[in-house]
Amino acid sequence: MIQRLVAKRYAKGLFLVGEKNGDYRSYFDDMEKVVSAVEGNERLKRALMLPLLEMEKRKEILSDVVRSLGLSPVVSTTLLLLMERNRMGYLPLIRDMYVDLMDAKEGRVKGSLYSAYPVSPDVKKRVEEALGEKLQKTVELATVEDKSLIGGLKVVLGGLRIDGTVKRQLEILNERITKE
């Protein structure tokens, strides 16, 4: 929980700077490059994240990474700040929080569509459009197959849950019967 709060603070700070100067999308691209590079190379990840190396040596490595990836000065300063505070491990979470901020700014909501069986692209599109009209936002759903559902659909968008599954209908029926 604390990690999410800390990551959100860094993401929000970077996003506000990007929003102010109009570069918030390029900052995301830079964050994506860094996360991919660090997560894709275990030695680099350890060198940047473990405080076993001297800070100056880690800064040199970070400088080389920034130069090779061609990162913006704002993102590189953010990375340096993270390193000095031993929070480089927060990078993937900061990137995820940054995506949430971008989605909110651009009127986009992401969520999951659960079904017991594969959902056709047409059904998925209709559900996204219907929810988009209700929420006045662009809805993007990832489909998830969940065999425990029996049938029907369940949608989870942030804090919003719409459960139209057979499993849930049976639970409701059971609750009504036991009340009587």
Image (cartoon, rainbow, N blue to C red):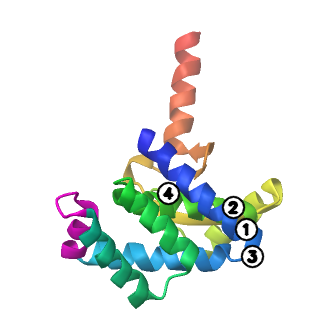
Going from the N terminus, do you reach mark 3 or mark 4 first? 3
Q: Secondary structure at mark 1?
A: helix
Q: Marks 2 and 1: in contact by CB < 8 Å? A: yes
Whole-angstrom CA distance, mark 3 to mark 1, is 5 Å
For mark 1, what is the residue? 19
Q: Residues within 10 Å of mark 4 (few under 14, many from 20)?
A: many
Q: Is residue 35 magenta?
A: no
Q: Marks 1 and 3: in contact by CB < 8 Å? A: yes
Whole-angstrom CA distance, mark 3 to mark 4, is 39 Å
Q: Secondary structure at mark 4?
A: strand
Whole-angstrom CA distance, mark 2 to mark 3, is 10 Å
Q: Nearer the viewer, residue 153 or 43?
A: 43
Task: Tell me which amino acid carries mark 3.
Answer: Gly
Labels 3, 4: front one:
3
Going from the N terminus, do you reach mark 2 or mark 3 first? 2
Name the residue located 54 percent from the left edge and 20 percent from the top edge.
175
Q: Is residue 43 magenta?
A: yes
For mark 4, what is the residue? 115
Q: Marks 1 and 4: in contact by CB < 8 Å? A: no
Q: Marks 2 and 4: in contact by CB < 8 Å? A: no
Going from the N terminus, do you reach mark 4 or mark 2 first? 2
Q: Is residue 62 left or right of residue 79?
A: left
Q: Is residue 138 left or right of residue 25?
A: right
For mark 3, what is the residue? 22
For mark 2, what is the residue? 16
Task: Tell me which amino acid carries mark 1.
Answer: Glu
